[in-house]
Structure formats: C-alpha cells, structure tokens
Amino acid sequence: MSKIKATTNICMIIGDPVEHSLSPKMHNNAYKHLGVEDKFVFVGSNIKKENLKDAINAVRTLGIRGLTCTIPHKQEVIQYLDELDEIAKKIGAVNTVVNNNGILKGYNTDYFGIEIPLKKRTEIKDKKVALIGAGGAAQAIAYVVEKEEGVLKIFNRTYEKALKTAKKFNAEARRMEDCKEILDCDIIINSTNIGMGKFEDQNPIPLELIQKNHIVFDIIYKPKETALIKKAKQVGAEIIYGYETLLHQALVQFELYTNLKASEKSMLEVLI
C-alpha cells in the first residue's frame, strides 16, 4: 500500500452500521487502477446519529475531500451543508458531499444506481412499482419512478412517513398491513435495511407475495442474496442485485470526488 502523503485527498463513508460497506475497497481499487492511490484514499467510519454534526465539522476541519453518506444520515446531513445540487434538493436526500475549499455541496447519485439497472430490464413508464420503505434511499427511488412516469405505491411501517414521501413524488402511501396489494405490482423494490446486518434473518415483506411475473430489486448488497432475492429466484422472478445500485451510484460519485472517470471493471472486481 502506498504511503499516505500530506497531499492525499481523503474520502470517507459514514453510516451506522458501516462495517459491511464495500465502498472503501471499491474506490481504493479504482484509485489503484488509475495509478492515483498516492493522491486519494477512501476510508469508512461508523458515526451515530447524535455525532453527525461533529462529523461534518471534522470534514471541514480536516479538509476531507469527499463524504459518502449511508443509512441513517442521508436526510439529516442536509442541514449541515452549504449547498445542494438541484436533483438532491428534489429528492431531499444526500449520499455524496464534495468539499471544495471548505464549501460543502450535497449531491444524490443514488438515483443513477436505481435508474440504470431498472431501465436495463424494463421500461418504467406505466409500470406499477411497490416501494418498501420511505427513508433516505427511498427518496431517490421515488424520484426515478416519478421521472419515468411509473405508478408508485409506498409501503412503510410508519404510515405518516410513507404519506409524506408519496405527496412529494405523486405516489400513493400504504400501511404494511396493506401489503397484499404488492401482488398486483410489476416491480418490487426494497429500500430498507431489513435483510442485512442484525436484520439479515428478517424479510421486508411476506415472501409469499413474490410472484414469477415480478421484477424484484433489493438495494441491499451484503449479503448478495437476501431472503427476498432468494425467494424471487425460487419462484422464477427477474431479480436485480443490490451491488448494481452500489456500482452505478459509485461511478458518478467517484467522478465528483476526483474529477476522473473510474474503471467500471475495477469496481466490479470488488463487488462480484
């Protein structure tokens, strides 16, 4: 490993949890591929909600170049930033923060990670989409479905949260008790953390709702095969792995941090 010099640009992912994240390995491998590993390094740090403000202050103080935000910081981080990209404003969630001489600007690259894999499989227009969850990641998904003129239903344990997101993106809100309506949908997307970490043995929806005609997209990438994905494969549904989301959002993010284009192959080496 190259020695970190004083001129090294530090990029970092923060979340809770963050230990599972492949972002550091993925970005660092891309730096190595381009021969800039002496100029950039990517690390991870577990940051609790109550410590988020201090973390953002540290980004300014230490001159950290790029900050990747994952669960649960994508919405809370906005209040501590100086500027927002127009798409991040619309989505209302930030997964990417760029530090330009102490000015912190927030972006959302998550929607690339949703839009590109979906459009490889199907036209979204007029498709009925069941979105599970209404948190930070869900905002980007809802944005994509609205932009592509799909028909969106948002299922969430807290109905009020689903309703707030639904109003913002011309969608319908549903309680989880109404989840049988998922049977009539074309696409199922899980945006929650149910299926990973301490929730790995849990499912975001009753698995019997998954049918052969569904496209099932779980944005969780570790484990690669969540219970939702396993069931979808079992019944013959089309599946989209979460690592595709991570890849496509990271390619855009990499360019924002470095002003360089990452090799897709170098990132896939880590993901697959």
Image: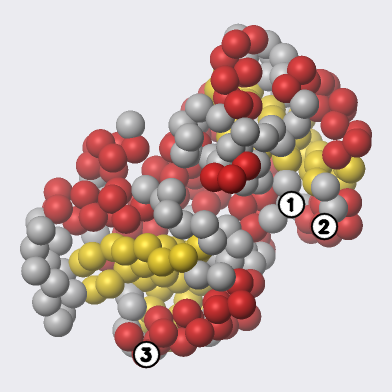
**Which type of secondary structure does the marked residue at label 3 adopt?**
helix
User: Label 3: which residue?
Assistant: 61
Answer few, some or many: residues within 10 Å of disc 2's Cα (few below 14, many 20 plus, some between 14 and 19): some
Q: Give whichever of 145, 49 is nearer the camera.
A: 49
Gap between marks 1 and 2, in whole Å?
6 Å
Vertical arrangement, residue 197 with respect to residue 123, above or below: below
Gap between marks 3 and 1, in whole Å?
33 Å
**Which type of secondary structure does the marked residue at label 1 adopt?**
loop
**Which type of secondary structure does the marked residue at label 2 adopt?**
helix
Q: Position of residue 183 (x, y in %)?
A: 81, 21
Vertical arrangement, residue 51 with respect to residue 269, above or below: below
Chain-order first, disc 3 or disc 2: 3
Residue at 50%, 70% (x, y): give it.
47
Which three-letter amino acid code belongs to the residue tagged 3?
Thr
User: Label 2: which residue?
Assistant: 161
Gap between marks 3 and 2, in whole Å?
34 Å
Q: Position of residue 141 (x, y in %)?
A: 64, 46
Q: Position of residue 74 (x, y in %)?
A: 59, 64
Disc 3 and disc 1 in contact, CB within 8 angstroms? no
User: Label 1: which residue?
Assistant: 134
Chain-order first, disc 1 or disc 2: 1
Q: Quadrant of the N terminus?
A: bottom left
Q: Quadrant of residue 126?
A: top right
Residue at 49%, 47% (x, y): give it.
112
Disc 1 and disc 2 in contact, CB within 8 angstroms? yes
Vertical arrangement, residue 221 with respect to residue 238, above or below: below
Residue at 46%, 87% (x, y): give it.
57
| Residue 110 appears in the rendering | yes
Which three-letter amino acid code belongs to the residue tagged 1?
Ala
Chain-order first, disc 3 or disc 1: 3
